[in-house]
């Protein structure tokens, strides 16, 4: 072929070569290659709500956006998958087309192909010619410019919904998201980062209020139970609209043996052998079976998008979060977080930002900076976590909790993060109880539980400490066995909680069993065994078994001297215990020396020093020496009130002793004032039926009676 005949064909063109005159006739028959959506005038959604519950404020704002002559606005509805963003957009679409006189246009923006095809269909709807559309599809003219030209020129106001725009880069790269004076744009997305949506108004969507969540279940399954039953199930489902819809759909479509809401709720705890997430997802057939409508799939879509953006470590961080609870998690827990090469410490910040931007977790309001992740999401992620990652994740979660929980918590107000960690420690115990992990990691979670209950007890919240301890023991017992040292220590804390709650018989019974276990497993001289002696002695004093109690106090003190030394804090504390129980003058006389020793070894403000002052004053007053007792009790009361507050349970003990000493000195008016505060405070903090509350009221009556007679 000569250079004169060189040619190129493009598209459907063809080249003909001939040496003479030729007459060529071609007939081109064009067939439609349209691959766009069948309609943009009808929302392509699954099952829509029977009634849109809650969202009143958001709907008012969106209704205003489709009023006559309103345009040039873009609204971004963002939140966790399944929180009802599309349902709100659908409700607005129906309002705009039926009441507001607008054309409704609905485009699936989940991927480039769907978005492009849908937007070109919008252009066709608004008047674009076949030639213009062919040119846009073939790349001969800018497709987004064509679409927005026809939207701007629309002779009717419109509402354009870009649904499932979870990858905003698709919209930005093609210039698909714009505003127009002739219409309003609404975007639904999980992507919460504001930098993706310049000029748009962002509306965040979360879970439903309890009452509305219950009504969603009742809308779908009205005969399954009462509104109270529905509310309880809604709480178990975290009030997430998707989970509520799946549960309601499941209940509404049962045929052979329909369950009630109460039946469904009982099965959500897994006790019937059903996996909770699998149970929830059985309702997917009621809403069309789309994979986006499955909890186990909805979060994976976001993680896939993050991995595509070069942030695969976000998935590993989410699996770490799944070791904990859906309650607010202090962000400081994540300081030092790492999972080896999968999640280096240097990548935790970017991984967390990715999870927040994709609405997989969120910052929770409050004085302490916290994260909050939905419970259904966490359970779904934990369920899908590979078994070979369980060990590393559990160990890391325990290590991070231990870094925040004090090893030896002091009495009094704790770091507020400690109470926030409580549900997360229990959740971690539940995860480790169900995962096949090593005993050392299970014991690390048990240590978390022990530190937690000790701190909560030290803060004076004995009922919560007992509850946490009981839960921990039940979860750990099958994995560790009752003779494990961590289980023994947790049970001992429970015995101490029972004592502080005034349940002396139960406390004594449990602590006696623990002492026997310690002697058998650890030996009679082990520090834990000696601590068990001290703990058992306390309820025995209150049960008027003082000889046995004093014997146990002495055994503990003498044992601590041999094992820990004469000035160890536990030794000094055990010697102080003897002052409380023994009436012997030799012990009473030793009190002043003990206080001086505590001040010298530990300092004036140390808790052990304060307890020594209290017990020294108590023993001196009991021995009929109130004048000597008064300086010690005044010192102890001032320090207790300053350090722990006047409503702290031990402060009431000090104040009652102060009142008794003042009464013994004839200072009745001040004594009565103190006892009034004790009686009122114990009623408020411990309850009216606590033995110590009753005792305070009896003392107050005794102190008042002689005054009335005079």
Image (cartoon, rainbow, N blue to C red):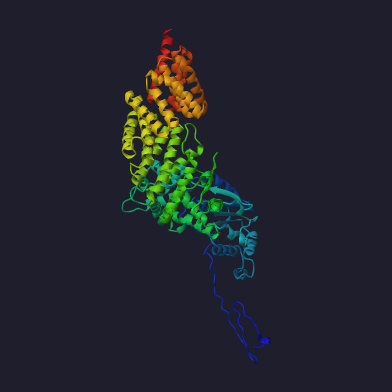
Name which residue lies at 45% across and 16% down: 661
Name which residue lies at 32% across and 40% down: 521
Q: Residue 463 in the image: x percent, y percent?
A: 41, 33
Identity of the residue furthest to the bottom in this view: 20
Identity of the residue furthest to the top in this view: 710
Quadrant occupied by the C terminus? top left
Q: Residue 273 in the image: x percent, y percent?
A: 33, 51
Give the mark count: 0
Q: Residue 443 in the image: x percent, y percent?
A: 40, 45
Query: Residue 556 sits in which quadrant?
Result: top left
Residue nearest the observer in this picture, 108 or 65? 108
- Answer above or below: position of 97 versus 638: below
**Does residue 35 show up?**
yes
Residue nearest the observer in this picture, 419 or 519? 519
Query: Residue 676 sits in which quadrant?
Result: top left
Quadrant occupied by the N terminus? bottom right
């Amino acid at each position: 072929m000569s250079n004169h005949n060189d040619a190129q064909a493009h598209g459907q063109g063809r080249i003909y070569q001939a040496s003479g005159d030729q007459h060529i006739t071609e007939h081109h028959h064009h067939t439609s290659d349209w691959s766009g959506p069948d309609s943009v005038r009808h929302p392509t959604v699954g099952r829509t709500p029977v009634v849109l519950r809650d969202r009143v404020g958001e709907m008012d704002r969106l209704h205003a956006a489709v009023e006559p002559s309103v345009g040039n606005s873009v609204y971004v509805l963002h939140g966790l998958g399944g929180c009802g963003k599309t349902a709100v957009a659908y409700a607005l679409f129906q309002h705009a087309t039926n009441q507001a006189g607008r054309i409704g246009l609905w485009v699936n923006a989940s991927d480039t192909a769907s978005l492009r095809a849908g937007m070109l269909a919008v252009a066709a709807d608004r008047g674009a010619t076949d030639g213009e559309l062919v040119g846009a599809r073939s790349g001969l003219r800018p497709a987004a410019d064509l679409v927005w030209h026809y939207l701007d020129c629309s002779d009717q106001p419109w509402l354009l919904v870009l649904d499932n725009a979870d990858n905003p880069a698709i919209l930005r790269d093609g210039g698909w998201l714009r505003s127009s004076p002739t219409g309003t744009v609404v975007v639904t997305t999980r992507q919460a980062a504001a930098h993706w949506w310049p000029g748009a108004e962002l509306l965040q969507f979360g879970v439903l209020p309890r009452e509305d969540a219950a009504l969603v279940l009742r809308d779908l399954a009205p005969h399954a139970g009462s509104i109270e039953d529905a509310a309880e199930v809604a709480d178990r489902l975290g009030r997430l609209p998707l989970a509520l819809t799946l549960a309601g759909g499941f209940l509404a479509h049962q045929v052979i043996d329909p369950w009630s809401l109460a039946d469904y709720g009982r099965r959500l705890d897994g006790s019937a052998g059903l996996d909770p997430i699998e149970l929830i997802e059985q309702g997917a057939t009621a809403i069309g079976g789309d994979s986006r409508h499955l909890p186990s799939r909805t979060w994976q879509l976001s993680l896939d998008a993050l991995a595509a953006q070069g942030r695969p470590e976000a998935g590993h961080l989410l699996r770490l979060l799944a070791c904990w609870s859906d309650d607010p998690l202090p962000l400081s827990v994540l300081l030092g977080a790492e999972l080896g090469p999968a999640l280096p410490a240097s990548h935790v910040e970017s991984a967390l930002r990715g999870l927040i931007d994709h609405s997989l977790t969120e910052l929770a309001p409050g004085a302490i900076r916290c994260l909050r992740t939905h419970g259904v999401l966490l359970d779904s992620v934990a369920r899908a976590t590979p078994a070979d990652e369980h060990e590393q994740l559990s160990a890391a979660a325990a290590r991070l909790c231990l870094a925040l929980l004090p090893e030896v918590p002091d009495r009094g107000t704790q770091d507020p993060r400690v109470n926030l960690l409580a549900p997360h420690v229990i959740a971690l115990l539940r995860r480790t109880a169900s995962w096949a992990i090593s005993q050392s990691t299970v014991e690390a979670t048990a240590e978390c539980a022990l530190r937690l209950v000790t701190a909560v007890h030290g803060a004076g919240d004995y009922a919560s400490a007992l509850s946490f301890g009981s839960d921990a023991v039940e979860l750990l017992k099958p994995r560790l066995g009752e003779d494990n040292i961590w289980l023994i220590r947790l049970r001992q804390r429970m015995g101490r909680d029972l004592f502080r709650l005034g349940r002396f018989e139960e406390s004594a019974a449990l602590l006696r069993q623990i002492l026997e276990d310690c002697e058998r497993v650890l030996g009679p001289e082990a520090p834990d065994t000696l601590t068990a002696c001290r703990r058992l002695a306390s309820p025995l004093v209150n049960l008027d078994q003082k000889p046995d109690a004093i014997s146990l106090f002495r055994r503990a003190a003498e044992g601590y001297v041999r094992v820990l030394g004469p000035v160890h804090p536990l030794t000094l504390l055990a010697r102080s215990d003897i002052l409380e129980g023994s009436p012997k003058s030799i012990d009473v006389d030793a009190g002043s020396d003990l206080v001086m020793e505590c001040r010298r070894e530990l300092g004036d403000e140390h808790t052990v020093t304060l307890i020594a002052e209290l017990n020294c004053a108590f023993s001196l007053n009991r021995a009929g020496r109130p004048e000597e007792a008064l300086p010690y009790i005044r010192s102890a009361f001032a320090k207790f009130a300053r350090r722990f507050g006047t409503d702290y349970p031990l402060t009431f003990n000090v104040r009652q002793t102060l009142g008794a000493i003042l009464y013994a000195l004839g200072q009745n008016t001040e004594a009565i004032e103190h006892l009034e505060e004790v009686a009122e405070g114990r009623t408020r903090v411990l309850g009216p039926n606590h033995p110590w509350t009753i005792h305070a009221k009896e003392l107050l009556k005794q102190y008042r009676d002689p005054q009335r007679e005079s």
